[in-house]
Image (cartoon, helix red, strand yellow):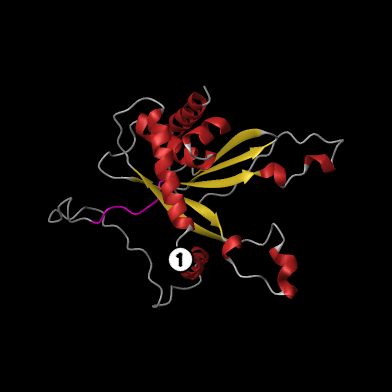
């Protein structure tokens, strides 16, 4: 699949965005009127100034996290059942990824978003613990009305802004897990996993032991049988691209 991606001018990461998008379309679980939004993380280390010598040991550690987030938005409709659609959507994803990486406001935007997420997380943690109400300066998302306002038309309603899923694209992990340092041990499998928020759905994609791996984590309470059907379709799309 690497050679196929190179020939099409995209990477595995771009293909995973496209495969996830096309798979939802294939199982008929998305509205064609609204685009599909996915999110991913971006390594900020290449954009940061050199660390002071006193912090250099932290900056060189894999545990020193420096990431920003961005969205990839793809259409939710299709009139093409061939693999050409996946390659086309992969190129659209590539364009958006490059735009996010080259944005001159990347660092300042990331700092602002990190502060906002931090404040929001503290408020929700306090509410979960039943400690106190949020301060007036922090704005929580509005609670949706139980019944829609009949005076609102579909054109006047604000479009949804929630990402359908996230993709954590870890790259080639063989450069981190140096197999040659442990000749008596065969490292053959690496499984990732993280606790998902309510309604969360996260796909990990990475290369390990010379193979492409995909790992799925999701909130079982929010998704029913459609996740299994969608995941089967994602794997089918990836397999089809290899031939």
Rendered location of residue 66, percent (x, y): 60, 62
Q: Which of 99 and 141 is in front in this view?
A: 99
Q: Residue at x 46, y 50 (%)?
A: 97
> Secondary structure of the magenta portion, mostly?
loop
The residue identified by callout 1 is 104
Read off the magenta span: 158-164
Q: Which residue lies furthest to the bottom in this view?
A: 136
Q: Can residue 239 be spotted in the picture?
A: yes
Q: Which residue is drawn at 43% across and 55% down?
A: 99
What kind of element bears circle 1?
loop
Decide if residue 198 is on the left or right side of residue 194.
left
Quarter location, residue 184: top right
Q: Nearer the viewer, residue 214 or 130?
A: 214
Residue 160 painted magenta: yes
Rendered location of residue 142, percent (x, y): 32, 63
Q: Which residue lies furthest to the top in this view?
A: 243
Q: Nearer the viewer, residue 155 or 226?
A: 155
């Amino acid at each position: 699949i690497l050679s196929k991606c190179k020939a099409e001018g995209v990477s595995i990461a771009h293909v995973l965005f496209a495969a996830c998008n096309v798979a939802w379309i294939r199982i008929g679980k998305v509205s064609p009127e609204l685009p599909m939004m996915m999110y991913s993380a971006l390594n900020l280390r290449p954009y940061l100034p050199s660390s002071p010598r006193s912090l250099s040991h932290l900056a060189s550690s894999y545990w020193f996290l420096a990431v920003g987030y961005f969205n990839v938005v793809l259409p939710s409709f299709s009139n093409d059942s061939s693999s050409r659609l996946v390659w086309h959507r992969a190129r659209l994803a590539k364009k958006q990824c490059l735009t996010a990486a080259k944005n001159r406001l990347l660092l300042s935007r990331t700092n602002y978003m990190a502060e906002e997420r931090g404040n929001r997380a503290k408020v929700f943690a306090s509410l979960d613990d039943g400690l106190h109400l949020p301060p007036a300066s922090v704005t929580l998302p509005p609670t949706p009305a139980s019944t829609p306002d009949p005076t609102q038309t579909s054109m006047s309603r604000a479009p949804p802004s929630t990402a359908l899923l996230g993709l954590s694209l870890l790259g080639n992990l063989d450069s981190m897990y140096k197999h040659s340092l442990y000749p008596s041990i065969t490292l053959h499998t690496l499984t990732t996993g993280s606790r998902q928020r309510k309604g969360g759905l996260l796909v990990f994609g990475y290369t390990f032991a010379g193979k492409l791996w995909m790992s799925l984590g999701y909130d079982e309470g929010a998704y029913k049988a459609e996740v299994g059907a969608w995941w089967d379709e994602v794997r089918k799309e990836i397999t089809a691209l290899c031939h």
